[in-house]
């Protein structure tokens, strides 16, 4: 694939070490590409990993996983998204295991992982562990991923109720993660309904995203503090970046005992304003309003100048009655006027649409850069100059 300067989905993200830990072992990245020179289909990949395995070892595993998965996806042609995602996660798991053997301090490290790959308007996803992927559509939040935990298996088998599972002591016993001594394949079951079989859930890969749909990727630091109803309420009442900030703030207020990472992606609605407006929408509205006012002001000035020019061009001599025997002589001087130059207010061209991006985001300990375009104004109008009217002279008749 070819790196793209503009992403085709809106993005917002935040990461925090939490109140109980001084070290943030979460890592994430968002990258934009095109499938090729001739195939201009846009591609956006979001990867989030939560490190496990002790002081500093977890963040090493998460860093390796994010970089490895992002690199493998970027080097692919995007022709078989599910297979490519699965391969990328397995190669990342192997890289984590290999690195863990190089030092006793890294022994046993690992990471959970969740990936959302949007090609055009199609969603492909894979994950391992308890980092989650949600779909927000039409005011309803749907968890697409399935946790690989002891508690989730107990729920699936009816051994626990959701209330019992909430604060169960085995809530963080993970059965699948990158770097495990017993490697397992990533999960690709996109479960849209609890009644779906595994085969039906896998068939949901390539889910068509609608305008206004939001994808939420998060580590368990968020879902340990907030339930699905809490998250849904925030998404309903706040814009993209504001929603991310509020979710993070509420998680910290309720304890924040773990690292918290949130990535939000939204499909733009080209036909109407998106439900979750971007942070630049207000600035764009103000700029467009100023441009419209300047344009109308310029029209008013131009109309006034044209009217003044027309009135000055009209003859100002008032005819008077004289005897027929006397000669008629009109003054040789006539009215003339030069209209002063008029400077028109500048106008601004319509601003372009919210540019997509390459987004590569990491928490405060890693690099985070996102290029954005700027806007320029066209040249101002030119002054208008009126010309003097002709002079009429009548000679006296011969004697």
Image (spheres, helix red, strand yellow):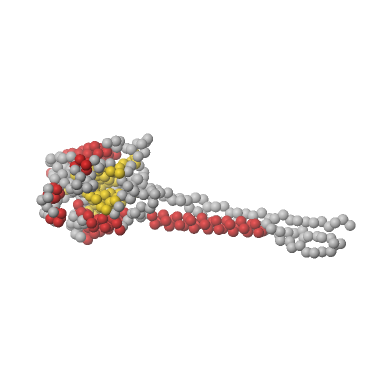
How far across and how far down the image is residue 268, in percent? 35, 49
Image position of 34 with respect to 224: above or below: above
Residue 177 % position (x, y): 17, 44
Can residue 34 be seen?
yes
Of residues 221 and 9, the one drawn nearer to the viewer in this rendering? 9
The residue sitting at the front extreme is: 195
Query: Extreme right residue here?
Result: 399
Left or right, residue 328 beside residue 303:
right
Compared across the picture, whether 244 is left or right of 303 comes to left
Residue 62 image offset from top left, x and y in percent: 21, 46
Q: Is residue 73 shown above or below 354?
A: above
Residue 190 location in percent, x, y? 23, 44
Image quadrant where one finds the C terminus: bottom right
| Near-viewer residue (238 or 208) | 208
**Residue 108 figure quarter:** top left
Q: Please indicate, yes or no, whether residue 371 appears anywhere in the rendered image.
A: no
Task: Give the residue at x 29% y 35%.
Answer: 79
Q: Residue at x 66, y 54 (%)?
A: 387
Residue 21 lies in quadrant:
bottom left
Task: Give the number of marks.
Answer: 0
Image point 18% across, 39% down: which residue? 185
Give the residue displayed 32% in from the left and 56% down from the top: 239
State which quarter of the image contains the N terminus.
top left
Q: Is residue 89 above or below residue 233?
A: above
């Amino acid at each position: 694939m070819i790196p793209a300067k503009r992403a085709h989905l809106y993005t917002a993200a935040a990461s925090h070490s939490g109140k109980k830990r001084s070290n943030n072992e979460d890592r994430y990245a968002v990258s934009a590409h095109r499938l090729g020179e001739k195939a201009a289909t846009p591609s956006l990949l979001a990867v989030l990993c939560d490190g496990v395995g002790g002081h500093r070892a977890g963040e090493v595993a998460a860093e390796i996983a994010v970089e490895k998965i992002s690199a493998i996806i970027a080097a692919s042609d995007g022709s078989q998204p599910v297979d490519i995602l699965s391969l990328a996660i397995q190669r990342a798991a192997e890289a984590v295991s290999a690195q863990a053997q190089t030092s006793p301090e890294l022994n046993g490290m690992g990471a959970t992982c969740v990936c959302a790959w949007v090609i055009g308007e199609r969603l492909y996803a894979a994950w391992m562990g308890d980092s989650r992927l949600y779909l927000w559509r039409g005011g309803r939040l749907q968890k697409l991923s399935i946790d690989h935990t002891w508690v989730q298996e107990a729920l699936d088998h009816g051994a626990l109720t959701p209330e019992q599972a909430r604060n169960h002591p085995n809530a963080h016993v993970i059965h699948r993660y990158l770097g495990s001594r017993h490697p397992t394949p990533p999960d690709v079951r996109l479960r849209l309904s609890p009644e779906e079989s595994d085969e039906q859930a896998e068939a949901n890969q390539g889910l068509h995203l609608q305008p206004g749909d939001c994808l939420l990727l998060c580590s368990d630091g968020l879902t340990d503090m907030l339930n699905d109803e809490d998250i849904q309420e925030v998404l309903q009442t706040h814009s993209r970046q504001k929603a991310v900030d509020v979710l993070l703030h509420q998680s910290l207020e309720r304890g924040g005992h773990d690292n918290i990472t949130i990535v939000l992606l939204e499909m733009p609605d080209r036909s109407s304003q998106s439900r979750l407006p971007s942070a630049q929408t207000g600035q764009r509205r103000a700029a467009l309003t100023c441009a419209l006012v300047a344009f109308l002001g310029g029209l008013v000035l131009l109309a006034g100048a044209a009217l003044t020019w027309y009135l000055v061009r009209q003859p100002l001599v008032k005819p008077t009655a004289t005897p027929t025997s006397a000669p008629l002589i009109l003054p040789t001087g006539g009215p003339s006027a030069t209209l002063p130059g008029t400077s028109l207010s500048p106008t601004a061209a319509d601003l372009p649409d919210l540019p997509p991006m390459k987004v590569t985001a990491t928490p405060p300990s890693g690099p985070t850069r996102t290029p954005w375009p700027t806007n320029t104004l066209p040249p101002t109008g030119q002054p208008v100059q009126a010309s003097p009217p002709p002079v009429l002279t009548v000679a006296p008749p011969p004697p």
